[in-house]
Image (spheres, rainbow, N blue to C red):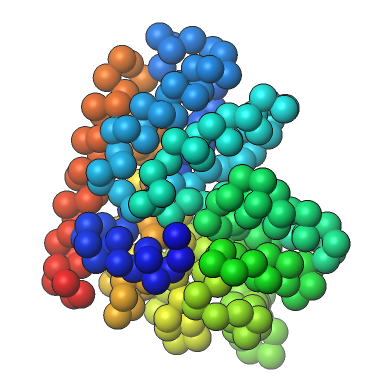
Amino acid sequence: MTPAQLVHAIKANRNFLCVGLDTAINLIPPHLGATPQAIIEFNKGIIDATKEHCVSYKINTAFYEAMGAKGWDIIGETLEYIPDTHFTIADAKRGDIGNTSSQYAKTFFETFNFDSVTVAPYMGEDSIRPFLEYENKVTIVLGLTSNKGAFDFQYQLIDGEPLYIKVIKKVAKWGTKDNLMFVVGATKAPDLAIIRQHVPDHFLLIPGVGAQGGSLEEVTQYGLNKECGLLVNLSRAVIYASNGEDYKEAAEKVVIQYGQQMKTLLTNTLL
């Protein structure tokens, strides 16, 4: 799925929700067990419960890589289960010298056929260029993050301008709105207005609404563009809405609630 197709899905569904499958084996409902197969069953249950109420899924690869080879199998099986009507994200935060990044790109765009992958821009253009060379694939670059460590570097002023703005401006020149997105934490909502001055047309992936305290209303207020341009990710608030046998029903209830809010916000602006 391309960004243009994602825009169509958002407008058709009046929804810009991404569900994050950050599945930890020690947090899934006990009745499922504690085996790799339990994670697959859990992920499929969450997908079944939420697919009518979201437009995207994000698989945080760290939770699966920690399991070794079997974890990669689970990534593949989970990805195959996601409908092709939904935008898929490998939340891998890769980025290395060119020949290494080319292998990372091959991993997530060929071996696993994700629509997009998150990358870290610290090593510069040659570390990101291999991802951008893939047609109909999207590279999602870390722009401004929600963690407290963001103040260590991202807000440091260089010639009177925060580093995160310099990074976003620079990276935006390496691609287009059709192959580049940026990650901006929901707890940084007011900064979205500044970011939109420099990348008015790019999609922004917004983690941090829900369990981390970000506000959907503020994210929409500051970050929405003429085609929506937002993917708001919810992970823990959805997948761990219940630790019981009703985990699917609880997850559906949460995504319906957020979906209704999104429908109202989009109806008032775009649709």
51 over 231 or under it: above or below: above
Residue at image point 20% right, 67% down: 266
Is residue 232 visible to us here?
A: yes
Residue at image point 55% right, 51% down: 114
The residue lying furthest to the bottom in this view is 159
Residue at image point 69% right, 90% down: 159
59 over 243 or under it: above or below: below
User: x and y percent of residue 197 in the render?
Assistant: 45, 86
User: x and y percent of residue 55 in the render?
Assistant: 34, 53
**Foreground residue, 143 or 110?**
110
Tell me the quarter of the image containing the N terminus: bottom left
81 over 261 or under it: above or below: above
User: x and y percent of residue 231 in the render?
Assistant: 39, 60
Q: Is residue 8 left or right of residue 60?
A: left
**Foreground residue, 195 or 203?**
203
Query: How many labels were placed on the picture?
Result: 0
Is residue 208 visible to us here?
A: no
Q: Is residue 172 left or right of residue 79?
A: right
Q: Quadrant of residue 47?
A: top left
Q: Quadrant of residue 188?
A: bottom left
